[in-house]
Image (spheres, rainbow, N blue to C red):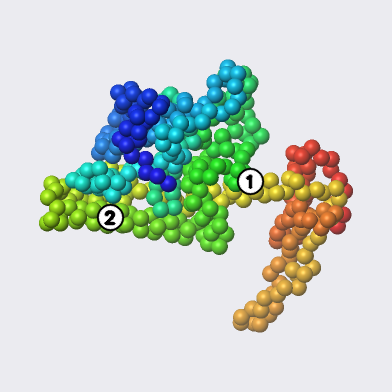
Amino acid sequence: MSVFDPPTVLELMRKSSLGIKVPEWKAAVEKRVESWLKPFKSDPKLARALPQLTRQFIFEAHVAQYVMAVWKATHIHGNSKSTTPKTLPKDVPIYGPRFLPSTLLDVSKRNPTCVEPETLYIRPLNVRSRGTSGSDLERGDVHGLFYEERALGYQLRCSECETKYKGKKVLGRDGEKLGYCFATTNAKAWAGINHWEIPRGIPYFTQRTAVTRELFDVIIELRPSTTSGKLAEEIKQLHLLEYHKRKHEYIQAHSTREVPSQFLDHSPLHAFSESFNMAGYADNTITDDFITDIYIEFTNRNARRRVRPVPSDARSLDNTFKSAIKATVVEAETYAHLKLMKGGILTVLNEMNQIISWKFCQSASVSEISELLEGIKKRLSFLGSTPRDVHS
């Protein structure tokens, strides 16, 4: 995965067959950065963070300009007679969809005297965008496994949905308001796509947050064997490890400037930012409630998609009520045998002995059994099937 160095990329694009003009590129970058900084300048609490935000936005603006140039060179116009995809010339470098900022090693190769800790504060950028105007670009934070990242997307407009829902308050099945404009950094744009169908390298977006694919895989694999709080603490420790690695990297890079045989201008040693300083490193790890939301959404979506194709022309109820009643616990003082469970596991099977639904009943009451059957009835209504007889 290559590093995206804006000055180097701009020089390569200028010399390429695309004929990129440097003044126009830089003017577009400045305009985009100014529009992104405008909401932050009005907030006095973020005044100290403006220098670092400016560095981050400059990097993101160069990436957006590069993506726009590549998209214009490869996209097919809607009125074009040809349907053959255009290919990118060989003299145009290919980056993305995850753009990594320059490291201290990269910077030192260009300018040996420029060793600044701010270089390590810039976050990687995940792009799910094409070439669009600045007003159509959507940006957001992405929680990572070792460090925080950023995401850049664009807005999708559905013309058919616009005629149906524009100016109207139409609610969906779950009570959400239906719209016609969706951003690729929004969970609604990925609602109908399984997580394994999302292109590799694209973050996983939810209603409340976004995570990298590495962090998403860790959550769905390790969350069943631990708690959300413990997993969040482990991820926080990984972030702290990465923070101290970068801090050590800066000290090492600065120490090379002190070699007597090198006649270089010594850059002063600056204090490395605290990990939580919003005007510097600005690390913000994922919390336990976000981990819980991600795992619940993952399990719910998988359960719905797994149960939906299971055939069930005939159904039968199987329970472990009698077996559960036999289980007893010995009381410590009186040595009396106590029966703590009155219910058991109630399972609904189809004609091929496949489980289509189950419930842990605590009292074996009629209401608990009815609740399970109501769920099956609701499932049949969603699938458009007619209710069948259930045998116990």
Residue plotted at (30% across, 46% down): 106
Name the residue carrying label 1: 301
Q: Is residue 384 above or below residue 221?
A: above
| Residue 140, placed above or below residue 273 | above
Identify which residue is drawn at 74% across, 53% down: 357
Residue 129: % across, % down: 48, 32
Q: Quadrant of residue 77?
A: top right
Q: Nearer the viewer, residue 27 or 71?
A: 71
Q: Residues within 10 Å of mark 1 (few under 14, many from 20)?
A: some
Amino acid type at circle 2 is: Glu
Task: Between residue 325 and residue 80, name the one nearer to us.
Answer: 80
The residue under label 2 is: 249
Return the disc, 1 or 2, that comes first in the chain's sequence.
2
Q: In the rendered view, does 242 fall on the left or right side of 304? A: left
Q: For the residue labelled by badge 1, is the local secondary structure a helix, a strand or a loop?
A: helix
Taking 86 as reference, is 202 above or below it?
Answer: below
Q: How many marks?
A: 2
Q: Quadrant of residue 391?
A: bottom right
Image quarter of residue 59: top left
Instruction: Give the residue at x 86% y 57%.
Output: 392
**What amino acid type is highlighted by mark number 1?**
Arg
